[in-house]
Image: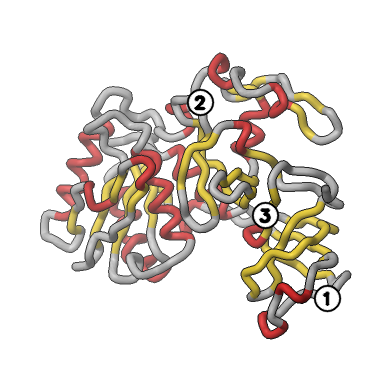
């Protein structure tokens, strides 16, 4: 069946040879699979492109193996994002298909907030004689159903302009007082700008702090589905999302292997890396063996190691 509907292949790098084989088989059948090793172009930001491909896919194949179910990191975030997309689909709609590459267990991957668990989805054993045939039946059932051929994810779940325009007016104002009112892709530009962000800060009400997260899409209820760097997925209102602070903003930042946060000032930004200058703190609060910055010490830090306290501010209280 010739179709432009994208089929995303989520997998662990150790399974790349087997997944490339699946990719080529789907391609030969006239489908439109998407695989980073085959479809990423030199110079593209691989994190951004993978997230975009996953959001816009009609189907996601979670390629499971003894490698992937034990691996922590980006592949688990892919699986969790795909699972979160299921939360916006009507009952019975096929989107995420667990594909076992070997006789592995199905991981207990759940999103409690959405009452979803990967184990609740029927899987297919690709290593069985009729494994690919059964997979193809599921793909055909999806693509021939109502709305077949139209990508899921952001394209199909974005609310109209009237829903997005209900967001607080302050969200449309960016540093320097610039207000975004033009429209792109059926959304006010400030909403699309949020989605285009590689990383943002999202509010965590349990402790009153703002932590790094990525936005996956706008849900049908008009909220933003975000994923924190530790893998937690949830929906947040526009009031609970802010941009990463600019240069000269004050933050708290972890130092080397120390899990404590220390006050710092952003000196330079480069993608997901921040060059910070550490400020004063009470040395009596920390064990010297834990490792701590010196006053005025400058260092690069990954963006997942920062947070804001309470309301965001360009200067300390």
| Disc 1: which residue | 294
Residue 111 is labelled as none
* Measured Cα–Cα span from mark 1 to mark 2: 45 Å
| Disc 3: which residue | 307
* Measured Cα–Cα span from mark 3 to mark 1: 19 Å
In primary-sequence order, the first of circles 3 and 2 is 2
The extreme top residue here reads 162
Horizontally, is 260 left or right of 294 in the view? left
Query: In the image, is residue 220 above or below residue 54?
Result: above
In primary-sequence order, the first of circles 3 and 1 is 1
Element assignment for label 2: loop
* Measured Cα–Cα span from mark 3 to mark 2: 25 Å
Q: Are marks 1 and 2 in contact (CB under 8 Å)?
A: no
Query: In this view of the protein, can residue 28 be seen by the observer?
Result: no
| Disc 2: which residue | 222
Query: In this view of the protein, can residue 7 be seen by the observer?
Result: yes
Element assignment for label 3: strand
- Badge 3: residue crowd in 10 Å (few <14, some 14–19, many ≥20): many
Element assignment for label 1: loop
Q: Quadrant of the N terminus?
A: top left
């Amino acid at each position: 069946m010739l179709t432009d509907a994208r089929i995303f292949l989520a997998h662990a790098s150790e399974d790349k040879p087997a997944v490339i084989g699946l990719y080529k088989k789907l391609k030969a059948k006239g489908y439109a699979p998407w695989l980073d090793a085959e479809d990423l172009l030199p110079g593209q930001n691989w994190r951004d492109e993978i997230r975009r491909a996953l959001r816009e896919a009609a189907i996601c194949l979670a390629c499971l193996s003894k490698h992937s179910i034990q691996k922590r990191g980006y592949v688990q975030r892919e699986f969790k994002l795909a699972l979160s997309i299921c939360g916006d689909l009507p009952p019975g709609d096929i989107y995420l298909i667990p594909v076992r590459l070997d006789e592995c267990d199905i991981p207990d991957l759940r999103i409690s907030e959405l009452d979803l668990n990967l184990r609740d989805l029927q899987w297919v054993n690709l290593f069985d004689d009729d494994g690919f045939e059964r997979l193809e039946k599921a793909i055909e059932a999806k693509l021939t159903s109502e709305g077949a051929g139209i990508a899921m994810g952001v394209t199909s779940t974005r609310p109209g302009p009237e829903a997005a325009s209900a967001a607080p007016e302050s969200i449309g104002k960016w540093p320097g007082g610039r207000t975004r009112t033009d429209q792109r892709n059926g959304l006010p530009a400030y909403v699309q700008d949020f989605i285009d962000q590689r990383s943002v800060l999202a509010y965590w009400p349990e402790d009153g702090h703002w932590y790094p997260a990525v936005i996956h899409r706008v849900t049908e209820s008009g909220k933003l589905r975000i994923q924190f760097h530790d893998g937690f997925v949830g929906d947040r209102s526009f009031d609970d999302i802010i941009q990463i602070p600019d240069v000269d903003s004050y933050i708290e930042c972890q130092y080397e292997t120390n899990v404590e946060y220390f006050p710092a000032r952003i000196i330079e930004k480069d993608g997901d890396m921040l060059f910070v200058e550490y400020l004063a703190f009470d040395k009596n609060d920390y064990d010297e063996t834990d490792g701590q910055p010196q006053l005025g010490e400058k260092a690069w830090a990954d963006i997942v190691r920062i947070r804001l306290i309470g309301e965001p501010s360009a200067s300390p209280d």
